[in-house]
Amino acid sequence: MEYIVKTENLVFEYKIQVQTEGEEATTETEAALNGVDIAVKKGEFVAVLGHNGSGKSTLAKHINCLLSPTAGTMWVKGISVADEERIWDIRSSVGMVFQNPDNQIIATIVEEDVAFGAENLGVPPAEIRKRVDEALASVGMAQYAENPPHFLSGGQKQRVAIAGILAMRPDIIVLDEPTAMLDPIGRREVMNVVKKLNREEGITIIFITHFMDEAAQAERIIVMEEGKIAMEGTPGEVFAQIAPLKAIGLDVPQVAEIAAGLREAGINLPQGLLTVDALVEEICRLR
Amino acid sequence: MSIKISNLSHTYSKGTTFEKKALDDINITIERGEFIGLIGHTGSGKSTLIQHLNVLLRPDTGSIIIDGEDIHADKGRLKAIRSKVGLVFQYPEHQLFEMTVFKDVAFGPANMGIAEDETRQRVEDALAIVGIPPELHEKSPFELSGGQKRRVAIAGVLAMKPEILVLDEPTAGLDPRGRDEILGRIKEMHEKLKLTVILVSHSMEDIARLVDRIFVINHGKIALFGPPAEIFAQTQQLETIGLSSTQAAYVAKHLQEKGFKLPDGIYTVDGAVTEILKVVRG
Amino acid sequence: MLKITIGQYYHANSFIHRLDARMKLLCTIIFITVLFFVGNFLGYALAAVYLAIVIMASKVPPKYLFRGLRAILFIIVFTTFLNVFFTQGEDILFAIGPVQITLQGLLNAARMATRLVMLIVGSSILTLTTTPIQLTDAIEFSLKPFKKIGVPAHEIAMMMTIALRFIPTLIEEMDKIMKAQMARGADFDTGGLIKKAKSLVPLLVPLFISSFRRADDLALAMEARCYRGDVGRTRMKQMKLAMRDYKALAVMTIFVALIFALEYLARIWGIW
């Protein structure tokens, strides 16, 4: 089996200054990642859950070589992230979308911003033009090509950011809480674009989120806690474990909770019910 | 005490090409001690509405009467009204600026001209109710975690002893744990301090858990209003506005459509489980 | 909300808009330089006619253009005042106490004011008809020769782009913080100078902190998108000089020749 992203015992430590009253400041080492093993297949859609400080953003930044591991190894497309000469090969095939839509748009015109990454890669002008137009069309933002970005909604800005990555022709897109600052409409827009890119263009997606309904749409969920993998499996498998999820401070989609409540009361329902339709269908069968 | 908003309209950049009607003839009455949910997507006018409550914006037409007083009538009463109506903005932690948590929370009362002793008491009370322990009071607010920063900022408004607390998406960007913590604290404020609370959110789940009554705002108008059970039952109307109901409400609605005799007004997990059990078990 | 009208891009499709940004930058610099050589009013009249033609060709409504002048009205009035009262001269028109109003003073004031207005209007046309991106590209291009002596042309242009991109964001942010502090009883309007300066602390500290956070985020986002200075970088939009650019240059040359001819004649004939 070929894995596009793979880690082995990945550790990332950083130093913090600890100042206790009346004593001298000392440095302590904290581990943001504490032995993480993941393997993502090409074309997979993986959601990463975990509360703030669980290490999920740190993991994401390793995939793009924005951070380098303290110990352990990570391979992206078979290239070790420790191979400094090939950093740009990795970065050009891994695109990143961040949380704050305002803080990742560089240019004053939408299409100029979309071109930015491809320009950095030294793509010929005519080819950039073609890629920019395709990318904007594919995220549904073609009619805004010549607009200044500050008039766009949060969801639109995130789609522009995704288009900027598409113009670099990546194999993997890592999205670090891209919907955290958006309203329901914006969240839906981003989710739809991401699903489309995964399905139609075969781009591998690593999607970090706090929203369980978004994670439920992935093929696989990785739950992180204290720099380690706490749970892993299909959405059905992960969301069946309601008590452990709640213990680490995460939510469960309401449908899964209703199903669990009914099961607890002795109603015979199968595992892995995550959508309204699936649950309704099963309840209908009980008649 | 009540808040009475009558015929309130507001247009931005009047007379220019950027002219935008943000509020269009809003009429709302809120009773003392109510917990109100205000829902609407970005640009619906909800932020404009709550800024009027704090006299940060002035209406083009219409009025807001709080306790019988037109809040926009007398500029000399500005400070009194702003301390009566506490407004917590979106991402309130972005307004922190002082050297210590304590000083930052004391900023509001100091602006009100409150004496030092009283300010100290207020700051301590406010920080206690948002759950910031005394050992953090002398720390820099910038050393705290995201959720803690936000609670300090909310304490900064509480220290002004408002009777009405308006919060604009207080859980935005937080993880589930941080969200639960904040919502729990807000519920406590409502119950212990007997505050009238207006919670602005686009999270249906948050609203469903807490509020007595909901106003849904769309294109500057009140589109729907009523108790949660009524609002969440109107799945179709919510969807046309670009919002959605809770999953529990959808499950109940779909089952009704399939012929299950479920009562109207189910919108929580517990409600759904109880009622479905009744029907399934006959 | 705060409004900045000077130098904002005005979207239209005119001859001037279509000109290469580098040509516009060059012509603007020549125009401004020429203004400082002209000392006679015939020359100013010619410059005014030239400006009027350019404004018409640019399709920017004059109302929009001159609204920007309001912001610098104070500077014009102030320099006029200084020139009227503090220029020494022989032809004293009248005196109030120790202050003498001289003919030379009035003439100087008129010259200075005319120059200032034309300078602002002239450079406004450049920024009104050129998108910020084109302008920064043009500046980067014109700084390229100085790269050898260590002028970071690309970096300067990138800084300008980012600054332009974040101005609206920061204005919005300032508005938000201001309102949040006003909701906590802050008062930005009343009080003396010291109190006013003090009242800015709750506004500026959060604004700085948020700017640093944004800068941090942006640097990360740029790195993630493979930015490493102008090493191996290409541009989507290539700048190309067209026939119309050479036409514009020809018009500019004729204008300069005329101005200098007039200046020469004026000196011979002794026109002001």
Image: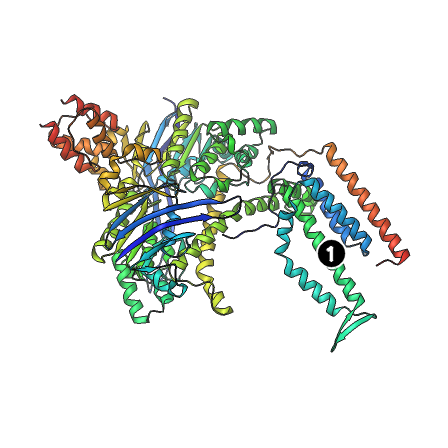
Q: In which quadrant of the rendered image does the C terminus of chain A lie?
A: top left
Left/right placement of residue B59 relative to residue A221 reads right
Residue drawn at the location 57% of the way across and 40% of the way down? C229
User: Looking at the image, which residue sits at the far bottom?
Assistant: C97
Q: Where is residue B27 drawn, in percent x and y?
A: 33, 48
**From this viewpoint, is residue B152 visible?**
no
Q: Which colouring convention does the figure follow?
A: rainbow
User: Looking at the image, which residue sits at the far right?
Assistant: C268
**From this viewpoint, is residue A256 visible?**
yes
Q: Where is residue B19 drawn, in percent x and y?
A: 49, 45
User: Looking at the image, which residue sits at the far left?
Assistant: B282
Q: In which quadrant of the rendered image does the N terminus of chain A lie?
A: top left
Assign a secondary structure to mark 1: helix
Residue drawn at the location 16% of the way across and 21% of the way down? A285
* Foreground residue among A5 and B189: B189
Q: Which quadrant of the structure image shows residue C135?
A: top right
Above or below — where is C168 with respect to A98? below
Q: Which quadrant of the structure image shows residue A54?
A: top left
Residue drawn at the location 29% of the way across and 40% of the way down? B204
* Foreground residue among C208 and C145: C208
Left/right placement of residue C20 relative to residue C108 reads left
Q: Where is residue B221 drawn, in percent x and y?
A: 36, 43
Above or below — where is B129 with respect to B277? below
Above or below — where is C82 with respect to B271? below
Residue tagged 1: C114
* Foreground residue among A211 and A121: A211
Query: Label 1: few (<14), some or many (≥20) within 10 Å?
Result: some
Above or below — where is B107 with respect to A120? below
Which amino acid, by three-letter code, is at mark 1?
Thr
